[in-house]
Amino acid sequence: MTDPLMKVENLEAWYGESKALHGMNFDVRPGELVTLIGRNGAGKSTTLRAIMGIVAKRTGSIVFDGTQLIGRRTYQIARTGIAYCPEERAIFSSLNVAENLTLPPVLKAGGIPDADLLVQFPNLQRRLKSQGTKLSGGEQQMLAIARILRTGARFLLLDEPSEGLAPVVVKDIGEQILRLKAQGFTILLVEQNLSFARKVADRHVVVENGVVVDTLDAADLAANLDRVKHYLGV
């Protein structure tokens, strides 16, 4: 067992006066792909935003690679090697694929070169001059993931990458995520699609009402499927 690359302890977070996280505790080891699963509103996406420092207030502890992230600004957190891909994808509609792809700055050495990204995401190569508004949902998701890979980050926060996509596209996204894991990226993935989560994750952290209520290895999930489905309201 290796030491955690990220350790979250007693994490609480607020939107204005509304408290969304009530003491999250989990860790992620180097090279792991860990999912946060749970019902809508459980606090999964808020956890990613709290890690990045984009909530109104947060307390507790988030230690990443020996660095305490509580008290740091979002740009400082990004420079530690963490990249965030939001659920809404945040593609700039007035920019084409090439412009969207190269917009984020390189923050650390070791990012994937643009030419290699286009090999890894061949759909983007064919759509370089297309505006963001003309991309399919799957193409937007691939662009959103691809552009954070050039920053040099090695720890990826991915929020609902399968949301609203056709099954064949979800399969492609899953294969891309597994390819990134094989390349050595560590990934914390928010996902409500249990079938998708089971295919990609090493461990599953179950979230309910802003706290962790269960943690299961991939091998344990099948044996506890009914319990997990109860958490998800399936």
Image (cartoon, grey):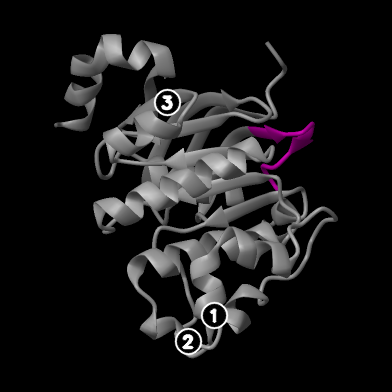
Sequence-first tag of 1 and 2: 1
Q: Position of residue 56 (x, y in %)?
A: 50, 56
Q: Residue at x 65, y 30 (%)?
A: 31
The residue at which mark 1 appears reads as 97
Residue range of the region highlighted in magenta in the rendering? 62-71
Q: Residue at x 61, y 83 (%)?
A: 99
The quadrant of the picture occupied by the C terminus is: top left
Q: Position of residue 148 (x, y in %)?
A: 63, 60
Answer yes or no: do the residues labelled 1 and 2 have beta carbons within 8 Å?
yes
Q: Is there any visible trace of residue 134 in the rendered image?
A: yes
Type of amino acid at the residue the image marks with label 1: Val
From this view, report whether residue 92 is shown above or below residue 94: above
What secondary structure is found at the residue carrying circle 1?
helix
Q: How many marks?
A: 3
Type of amino acid at the residue the image marks with label 2: Ser
The residue at which mark 2 appears reads as 130
What secondary structure is found at the residue carrying circle 2?
loop
Sequence-first tag of 1 and 3: 1
Residues packed near mark 3 inside 10 Å, few (<14), some (14 to 19) or many (20 plus):
many
Q: CA distance from mark 1 to mark 3?
A: 34 Å
The quadrant of the picture occupied by the N terminus is: top right
Residues packed near mark 2 inside 10 Å, few (<14), some (14 to 19) or many (20 plus):
some
